[in-house]
Image (cartoon, rainbow, N blue to C red):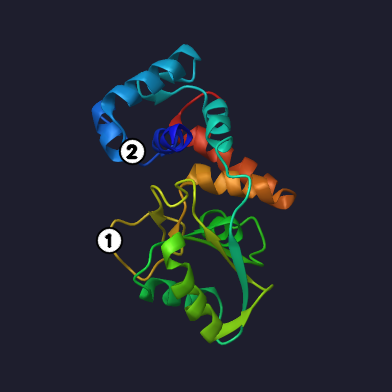
Amino acid sequence: MVKTKTKKVIALLLDNEYKPKSKYELAKKANCTPSWVLMLTKTLEKKGLLKGLKVIKVKELFELFNKTKPKKQETRAYTTYSIGGINELIKLLNKSKHEYALTTYTAENLVQKHLFNHRTDIYIKKEDLEEWHKEFTKIGTYGGGNVKLIVATHDELFNKKQINQKGSQITKKENTPWIVNTPQLISDLYTEGGPAKEAGDMLLEKLIKSLGAKK
């Protein structure tokens, strides 16, 4: 519980679109008590990672976030063949009433376009798994393939973003996909390794610049 609370607060601190006006506001958005957020931010300040609510060292703060990743994840894989590409898949996802967020290759391709989009990884809620399974077996086959459902267990859906096809965040509902927050995306790319790790490094450098912080 402490790890996931820490992860949520760090995700907000590393969100270049979110500028909390106070630690109370930060606590409310992270669904934590103000006293707990005050204790955490004081600890981060002592380590030289924060000054007030401004991030000073992005990479070191991200490393704390990255350490909270689960050791094992429940996944299901599918091969889809009755939909015409990623745009049709996004339409399918958005028609569902269930929460989701894209990560790794598809999410990276939407915001940066460095990687070949050979697989779509999707975080979902545990309670929605069987409903998603029914949907994907209608449009494809179960096992292997180009789509992977990942059951969220460590707040991976927290502070997700809706992104348009040009990689910009939007503020109104459109037929555009939801992706994980930036530190979560970088963390998942690091887990993939290889070219994905390189793409994660690029996103981390962009995040440092956008926050105006030291490395």
What residue is rendered at 41% in x and 59% in y?
163
What residue is rendered at 62% in x and 75% in y?
78
- Measured in 3D between alpha carbons, the distance from the residue under mark 1 to the one under mark 2, in whole angstroms, is 22 Å
Q: Outermost residue, right direction?
A: 194
Q: Is residue 35 above or below residue 132?
A: above
112 or 127, nearer to the observer? 127
Instruction: Please give the residue where the numbered disc 2 appears in the rendered image.
Output: 30
What residue is rendered at 60% in x and 67% in y?
76
Image x and y of residue 154, in percent: 49, 46
Image x and y of residue 208, in percent: 52, 33
Q: Indicate left or right for 146 with 153 as reference.
A: right
130 or 49, nearer to the observer? 130
Image x and y of residue 121, in percent: 57, 62
Q: Is residue 197 above or below residue 215?
A: below
Crowdedness near tag 2: few (<14), some (14–19) or many (≥20) residues, C-alpha within 10 Å: many
State the SS at label 1: loop
Query: Three-letter amino acid code at disc 2?
Result: Ala
Classify residue 142 by image quadrant. Answer: bottom right
Query: Three-letter amino acid code at disc 1?
Result: Lys
185 or 152, nearer to the observer? 152
**Which callout, 1 or 2, points to the residue nearer the camera?**
2
Quadrant of the rendering where the C terminus is positioned:
top right
State the SS at label 2: helix
The mark that comes first in sequence, 1 or 2, is 2
Image x and y of residue 186, in percent: 57, 45
Instruction: Please give the residue where the numbered disc 1 appears in the rendered image.
Output: 172
